[in-house]
Image (cartoon, rainbow, N blue to C red):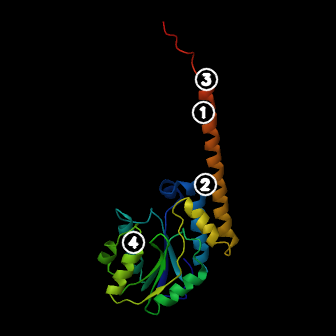
Amino acid sequence: MINLKHSKTAILIFSLSQEAENLRKPFLQKKDTASKLNALIKEKVSSLGVDYFHYTEKDQKGNNFGERYVNTVSDIFKKGYNNVITVGNDTLGLEKKHLRAAIESVENNQIPVGPSYDGGFYLLGLRKDQFKASEFLSLPWESSTLYKELKTLLSEKEIATATLPYLYDLDEELDISKNIASLSFLKVKALKLLQNLQVVILKVSKYILQKFKEASLNHLYNKGPPLVCN
């Protein structure tokens, strides 16, 4: 937690630990990438002058993603904050300017939403006086229609929104190259993390291919004697 400037607003980093990410996204276990992703988002958030909280699966409560998300947001509201801005750790294109814009929006009665290209969202600002747990529990969490359904919910409640730029998440190996392309103009640290991860995965793939070729050759040249029929 850091010193307050916006006393009514807190940022919630909602992510998993390295151990949990190893099971959910095996490709992130290379070089402790998940831990580095957590460190990167904390670095961005810690300079903004607002309180922030990092909840991993060890702190989250619920039987599914939606329950864990809603319960965690409710927990932050119970600490006395009027506004909560939620972010994950796997959107490397998320910059401080996006976070500052989100803080300004939520404190001016607008809900900031950062849509992801996969149909979800990487950032969402919530106001305590507009937050109803049951409505958010009914959203199609971890689906490609989440952002669409969220926009519909906010529109039906006539809640003003502020939309941030579309960004890529890091959900699977194919997302690495997409993030690298979009990060070419951003911080070297984030770009280097992705490039290192890509190199490791490539080396592992080559190693597996080589072992497969060796096994195939051994099978070819170690056949048993031909059968003799009387």
Between 73 and 138, the one nearer to me in the picture: 138
**Looking at the image, is mark 4 or mark 1 nearer the viewer?**
1
Between 48 and 33, the one nearer to me in the picture: 33
Label 1: which secondary element: helix
Question: Do residues under tags 2 and 1 come within 8 Å of each other at their CB atoms?
Answer: no
> Residue visible at 58% across and 22% down?
223
Give the residue at the far right of this rendering. Answer: 188
Label 3: which secondary element: loop
- Give the class, few, some or many, for how many residues have Cα within 10 Å of label 4's Cα (few <14, many ≥20): some
Label 2: which secondary element: helix
Q: Which residue is mark 3?
A: 222
Q: Which residue is mark 2?
A: 30
- Residue 145: x and y in percent read 39, 71
Q: Which residue is mark 1?
A: 216
Q: Which residue is mark 4?
A: 145
Which image quadrant: the N terminus? bottom right
- N-terminal of the two: label 4 or label 3? 4
Q: Is residue 150 above or below residue 208?
A: below
Question: Do residues under tags 2 and 3 come within 8 Å of each other at their CB atoms?
Answer: no
Give the residue at the far front of this rendering. Answer: 230
- N-terminal of the two: label 3 or label 1? 1
Name the kind of residue labelled 4 in the image.
Thr
Question: Do residues under tags 4 and 2 come within 8 Å of each other at their CB atoms?
Answer: no
**Looking at the image, is mark 2 or mark 3 nearer the viewer?**
3
> Residue visible at 68% across and 69% down?
189
- Residue 33: x and y in percent read 60, 60
- Give the class, few, some or many, for how many residues have Cα within 10 Å of label 1's Cα (few <14, many ≥20): few
